């Protein structure tokens, strides 16, 4: 696929996690760092951030279609300081920022997981336009899930501002990650068994502690959204209706407004509160806390998680807007899982 086309497809809903990097020595002196993609079922060992010379790696882990999961890792050939100020996945980009991203960003790799024993040839036709399927090769399998990988699917065609040093590092990353066992596959959709714990505030500044929040509900549906996401705003009124219906089952709906930078970000908080009021939303909305992406790795907006009373994730996240009745059906399924677990 052409990089600019991929950006148009993914940037509107893709939340990309960022790893900042800085200068260092050789790629074998320090233990490698593992990036895990639980939805797709892949983990990749990369050289530690300290050994890279001023680039960024951006990652995604999403559903393309039922039974089709997708990981993409981007490399941005910009100095660390520039990358950190430029790339903020919790907001929309300006035209100038988009141009800079296009000219310094390269798709390092793509991985597709096909469920139920399907092959790459079963890729839905509406996704074949932006995935160059002929360049994918078999990566491995786990149970009835087949994995395929493509390195540098676009080459350097669109990244006209990449330095020779950046290109050299990209080639080094590809070669080093091709070493045996650097990329491993596992059962897609596996979630961490570590309870989700945090302290933050709601939009009015009231303190919120995760144990108290989750502990009083059988199940909590956590909807992660941003004020600039049209799909997020569209579903807010229906989420309020859902909240009123499922409260009878001891299920709560909670929102997290991801583009609020911190409790002092009064402009975004004010905007979020106005949007919430306009939608008639009465359920709690939270300010994101430091480390939120470590426990709720969100790559698209809206993304919705389901969490039990002990802070454990229940099932896979939903990475799209849905009707309140579709959410209610999922809640019913997740409650059944909890009953079976007991």
Image (cartoon, helix red, strand yellow):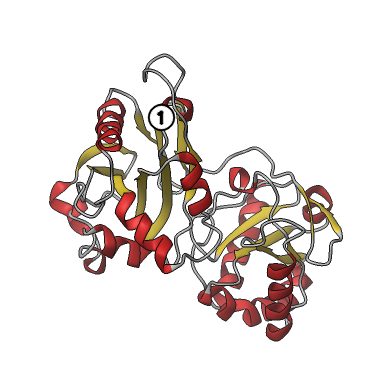
Quadrant of the drawing holding the N terminus: bottom left
Of residue 191 and residue 61, the one placed in the foreground of this image is 61
| Residue at horizontal 71 percent and vertical 60 percent from the top | 220
Q: Position of residue 228 (x, y in %)?
A: 55, 72
Q: Is residue 66 visible?
A: no
Q: How many marks?
A: 1
In the depicted structure, whether residue 78 falls above or below residue 176: below
Q: Position of residue 87 (x, y in %)?
A: 48, 53
**Residue that lies at the very extreme toward the top in this rendered image:** 29
Of residue 293 and residue 340, the one placed in the foreground of this image is 293
Of residue 29 and residue 164, the one placed in the foreground of this image is 164
Q: Residues within 10 Å of mark 1 (few under 14, many from 20)?
A: many
Tag 1, which secondary structure?
A: loop
| Residue at horizontal 36 percent and vertical 46 percent from the top | 74
Q: For this view, does 302 lie left or right of residue 109?
A: right
User: Pointer 1: what residue?
Assistant: 52
**Residue that lies at the very extreme toward the left in this rendered image:** 134
Q: For this view, does 203 lie left or right of residue 55?
A: right
Of residue 4 and residue 276, the one placed in the foreground of this image is 4
| Residue at horizontal 24 percent and vertical 33 percent from the top | 171
Q: Position of residue 249 (x, y in %)?
A: 75, 68
Q: Is residue 94 visible?
A: yes
- Answer with the quarter of the image where residue 219 lies: bottom right
**Residue that lies at the very extreme toward the right in this rendered image:** 206
Q: For this view, does 67 lie left or right of residue 217?
A: left
- Answer with the quarter of the image where residue 163 lies: top left
Q: Position of residue 215 (x, y in %)?
A: 81, 52
In the depicted structure, whether residue 96 falls above or below residue 78: below
């Amino acid at each position: 696929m052409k990089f600019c086309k991929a950006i148009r497809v993914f940037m509107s809903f893709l939340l990309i996690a960022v790893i900042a990097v800085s200068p260092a020595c050789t790629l074998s002196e320090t233990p490698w760092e593992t990036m895990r993609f639980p939805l797709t079922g892949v983990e990749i060992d990369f050289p530690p951030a300290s050994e890279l010379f001023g680039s960024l790696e951006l990652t995604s882990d999403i559903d393309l279609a039922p039974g089709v999961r997708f990981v993409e890792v981007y490399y941005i050939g910009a100095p660390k300081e520039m990358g950190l100020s430029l790339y903020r996945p919790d907001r929309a980009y300006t035209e100038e920022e988009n141009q800079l991203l296009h000219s310094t960003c390269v798709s390092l790799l793509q991985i597709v997981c096909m469920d139920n024993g399907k092959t790459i040839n079963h890729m839905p036709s509406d996704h074949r336009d932006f995935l160059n399927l002929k360049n994918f090769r078999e990566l491995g399998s786990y149970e009835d899930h087949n994995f395929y990988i493509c390195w540098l699917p676009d080459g350097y065609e669109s990244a006209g501002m990449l330095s020779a040093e950046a290109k050299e590092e990209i080639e080094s990353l590809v070669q080093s990650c091709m070493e045996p066992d650097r990329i491993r596959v596992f059962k897609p959709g596996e979630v961490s068994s570590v309870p989700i714990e945090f302290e933050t505030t709601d939009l009015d500044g009231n303190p919120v502690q995760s144990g108290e929040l989750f502990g009083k509900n059988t199940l909590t549906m956590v909807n992660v959204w941003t004020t600039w996401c049209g799909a997020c705003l569209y579903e807010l009124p229906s989420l309020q209706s859902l909240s009123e219906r499922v409260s009878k089952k001891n299920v709560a709906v909670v929102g997290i407004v991801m583009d609020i930078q911190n409790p002092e970000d009064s402009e975004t908080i004010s905007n979020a509160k106005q949007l919430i009021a306009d939608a008639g939303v009465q359920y709690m909305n939270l300010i994101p806390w430091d480390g939120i992406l470590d426990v709720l790795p969100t790559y698209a907006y809206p993304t919705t998680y389901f969490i039990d009373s002990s802070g454990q994730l229940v099932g896979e996240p939903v990475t799209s807007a849905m009707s309140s009745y579709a959410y209610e059906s999922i809640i019913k399924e997740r409650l059944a899982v909890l009953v079976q677990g007991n």
